[in-house]
């Protein structure tokens, strides 16, 4: 008992040295913070800092001065925001990284967002007719021109697009889909879950690796409302396989008077093979093949903001637009502004690869990457300190987010190693930089893929 009391006395004495919140606020050093921040916000942060001080005292630390406490408060208030507000350097080799926000926007799209945020806009107002307008007007004409569709509308992501179609056209009835196309995408989000949420019942046909035309024909019955085809995401089935091409699925469905929904996912509006890249289905080709509705993402190969785009036959698109769920799924003005500007680039830009960051990432030349690597390697090694070896090595990048699945893109990376420091420790050091640098650990080295690095300063952070 006496021993415990002897230990607690210095700690208790130290706790008495911790100033009250009001004492910190009244100090002259706190005045600049009071000018820049609300008092309530300052009180909140001061309390957190003082809690940390008490925890330190309990571990034997010395009590800081009021000036040091105010300095800690200022540091916390100036720290980078979390989540979407915190910039990171993507050197992972995954271009459309779902966890890092997928596509980065073109400068024209960023300017459009700023204007829409700063000023009122004719979001749902027809200026010429002086009457209520339609928010899809900003993108409908361009979407139809780029895809060859009769009509188009936009919701907040591709899963929402599929949900809206199934809810409007097949709730309470059956949707036929090949068993090999029941995909799961990021975050354990599965196509069957989307169908279940819509109230539709899935009717699976074929097997995981082989589906034939007769499987679709045999499954059609009085309860069938829709035939669904899904572009594989993040995987390829190889070997003993069989699939039914979209035109044949369309012919079977239309013969029975049924519409076809084609979920193409990645949203390619340009032929990637023209840039020496692997083939990805074009939305225009899917519309031309007869799909009544095609859904795809705005923030993948299209290179715009997160959005779910639906194009197709006018009669079906109008049914979707009139469905009550559509209002809950519609995008805001900032998304539409960025999307409209991105679509305009697809129609007008003489050099789309230079204007669209996603396409620029995909098409960078290996000599360009090697030159950046040779310049950065020695400088990064010096920044990391003695013993660090930084080499330019061959690397394989990937598009990401289910686009061009299972196809690597040749790239170059900086490989970082140290005889006494494991790669995961080096990775943690770079993640703690300002801004954090994110790479991947392979075979005992940290790889920083250079496809997404345009400025040397990106890999030479201000603080390690």
Image (tube, rainbow, N blue to C red):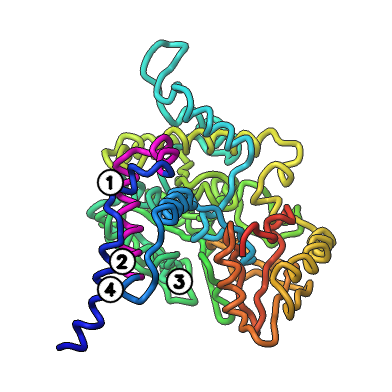
- Alpha-carbon distance for marks 4 and 1? 22 Å
SS of the residue under disc 4: helix
Q: Dividing the picture into quarters, in which one does residue 30 lie?
A: top left
Q: Which mark is residue 75?
A: none
- Alpha-carbon distance for marks 1 and 2? 17 Å
- Alpha-carbon distance for marks 2 and 4? 9 Å
- Contact? badges 4 and 1 (CB < 8 Å): no
Q: Which residue shows up at 62% across the image and 80% down it?
A: 423
Q: Which mark is residue 54?
A: 2
Q: Which residue is nearer to you in this view: 97 or 322?
A: 97
- Alpha-carbon distance for marks 3 and 1? 65 Å
Q: Which residue shows up at 54% across the image and 55% down it?
A: 102
Q: Does the magenta portion include 298?
A: no
Tell us which disc is closer to us: 3 or 1: 1
The residue that mark 4 highlights is 11
Tell us which disc is closer to us: 3 or 4: 4
Return the disc, 3 or 2, that comes first in the chain's sequence: 2
Q: Which residue shows up at 46% across the image and 45% down it?
A: 307
Q: Is residue 340 visible?
A: yes
- Alpha-carbon distance for marks 3 and 4? 65 Å
Return the disc, 3 or 4, that comes first in the chain's sequence: 4
Residue farthest to the left? Answer: 1
Tell us which disc is closer to us: 2 or 4: 4
Q: Which residues make up the magenta segment?
A: 30-56
The residue that mark 3 highlights is 180
Q: Which mark is residue 22?
A: 1
- Contact? badges 3 and 2 (CB < 8 Å): no
Return the disc, 3 or 1, that comes first in the chain's sequence: 1
């Amino acid at each position: 008992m006496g021993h415990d009391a002897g230990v607690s006395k210095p700690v208790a004495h130290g706790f008495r040295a911790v100033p009250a919140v009001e004492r910190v606020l009244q100090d002259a050093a706190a005045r600049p913070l009071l000018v820049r921040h609300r008092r309530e916000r300052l009180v909140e942060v001061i309390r957190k800092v003082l809690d940390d001080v008490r925890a330190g005292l309990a571990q034997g630390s010395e009590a800081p001065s009021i000036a040091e406490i105010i300095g800690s408060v200022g540091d916390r208030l100036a720290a980078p925001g979390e989540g979407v507000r915190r910039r990171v350097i993507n050197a992972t080799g995954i271009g459309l990284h779902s966890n890092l926000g997928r596509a980065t926007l073109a400068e024209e799209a960023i300017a459009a967002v700023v204007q829409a945020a700063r000023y009122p806009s004719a979001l749902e107002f027809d200026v010429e007719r002086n009457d209520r307008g339609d928010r899809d007007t900003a993108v409908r004409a361009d979407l139809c021109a780029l895809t060859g569709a009769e009509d188009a509308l936009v919701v907040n992501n591709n899963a929402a697009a599929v949900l809206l179609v199934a809810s409007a056209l097949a709730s309470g009835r059956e949707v036929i889909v090949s068993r090999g196309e029941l995909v799961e995408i990021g975050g354990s989000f599965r196509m069957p879950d989307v169908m279940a949420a819509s109230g539709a019942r899935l009717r699976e046909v074929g097997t995981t690796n082989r589906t034939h035309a007769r499987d679709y024909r045999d499954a059609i019955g009085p309860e069938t409302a829709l035939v669904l085809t899904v572009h594989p995401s993040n995987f390829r089935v190889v070997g003993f396989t069989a699939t039914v091409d979209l035109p044949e699925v369309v012919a079977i469905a239309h013969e029975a008077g049924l519409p076809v929904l084609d979920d193409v996912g990645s949203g390619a509006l340009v032929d990637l093979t023209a840039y020496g890249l692997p083939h990805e289905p074009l939305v225009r080709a899917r519309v031309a093949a007869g799909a009544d509705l095609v859904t795809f993402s705005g923030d993948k190969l299209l290179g715009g903001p997160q959005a779910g785009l639906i194009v197709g036959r006018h009669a079906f698109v109008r049914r979707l637009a009139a469905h009550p769920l559509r209002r809950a799924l519609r995008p805001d003005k900032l998304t539409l502004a960025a999307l409209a500007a991105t679509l305009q680039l697809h129609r007008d830009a003489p050099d789309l690869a230079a204007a669209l960051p996603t396409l620029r990432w995909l098409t960078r030349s290996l000599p360009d990457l090697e030159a950046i690597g040779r310049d950065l390697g020695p400088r990064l090694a010096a920044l990391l300190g003695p013993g660090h070896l930084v080499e330019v090595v061959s690397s394989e990048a990937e598009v990401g987010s289910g686009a061009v699945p299972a196809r690597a893109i040749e790239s170059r990376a900086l490989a970082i190693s140290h005889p006494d420091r494991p790669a995961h420790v080096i990775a943690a050091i770079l993640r703690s930089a300002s801004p954090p640098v994110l790479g991947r650990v392979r075979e005992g080295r940290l790889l920083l893929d250079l496809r997404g690095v345009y400025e040397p300063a990106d890999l030479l952070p201000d603080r390690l």
